[in-house]
Amino acid sequence: MVLQHYGVPTAPFVVLHLDDEEELTPEKIQKTIDNSQHAKSLSKYPLFAKPLAEGSSKGIQTSNKIRNASELYPAIQDVRASTVSSSGILIEAFLSGREFTVGLLGTGKNAWVVGVTEMVWKGQKRQDGALDENIAFTTERSKANDDWDGIVDEEIDQSVAI
């Protein structure tokens, strides 16, 4: 949300705010999506649901990738159950492709890039232990398993502008 505010391109998204008093229904989820500024983009699948304010893939499982409308409500329920302390759920267009983490230090004009890391996957294992080549994103479970080749640290120019 902050990046979008400053004009940095982001995936189309909507935040589903969680209220312990209010029952979460498929209709309420769909209404939140339909009333968002990205409603048109979020009407196309796949989507991805994740905790609003977590890191290190906390709350991410294979069910977070939503391939069709019938998977939306169960995926939201799974995210909610896996991160009960989260104040919301981010629903966004699924972004395929390479996965990078960029380390930054400092703020504003005094910020600089410390390093760039890429996750390189062999493939992840399903609950039954079989290899699932269709996952191809970091899950909380995959970080605890030996399902990846490791990281590739790339040399970068320390003068990268933020």
Image: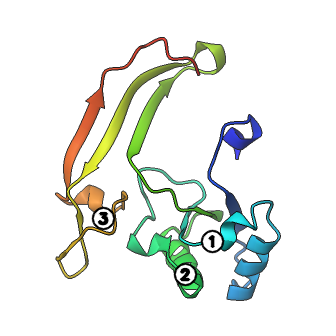
Q: On screen, 7 above or below 161?
A: below
Circle 1 Cα neighbour tier, 10 Å, few/some/many (<14 / 14–19 / ≥20): few
Can I make out residue 25 in this image? no
Give SS at disc 3.
loop
Residue at 63%, 47% (x, y): give it: 10
Question: Which residue is under mark 1?
Answer: 44
Q: Of the two numbered discs 3 and 2 on the same chain, state the one appearing first in sequence.
A: 2
The percent position of residue 92, horizontal first and vertical second, equals 61, 62
Percent position of residue 18, x then y: 69, 71
In the picture, measured across the screen, residue 147 lies left or right of residue 138, that is left
- Per the model, the C-alpha gap separating discs 3 and 1 is 27 Å
Q: Earlier in the sequence, mark 3 or mark 1?
A: 1
> Residue 112: x, y in percent?
51, 18
Is 112 on the left or on the right of 17, as rendered? left
Q: CA distance from mark 1 to mark 2?
A: 8 Å
Q: Amino acid at mark 1?
A: Lys
Residue shown at 55%/81% (left/top)? Answer: 68
Q: How many marks?
A: 3
Give the SS element for disc 1: loop
**Callout 2 crowding tier (Cα within 10 Å): few <14, some 14–19, many ≥20:** few
Give the mark nearest the N terminus, 1 or 2: 1
Q: Which residue is mark 2?
A: 68
Asked if 135 appears above or below 76 in the picture, the reply is above
Nearer the observer: mark 3 or 1; the answer is 1
- Give the foreground label among 3 and 2: 2
Residue denoted by label 3: 141
Residue 38 drawn at (x, y percent): 75, 61
- Dividing the image into 4 quarters, which one contains the C terminus? top right
Q: Quadrant of residue 111?
A: top right
- Whether tag 3 and tag 1 are in contact, CB under 8 A, the answer is no
**Which amino acid is tagged 3?**
Arg
The answer to whether marks 1 and 2 mark residues whose Cβ atoms lie closer than 8 Å is no
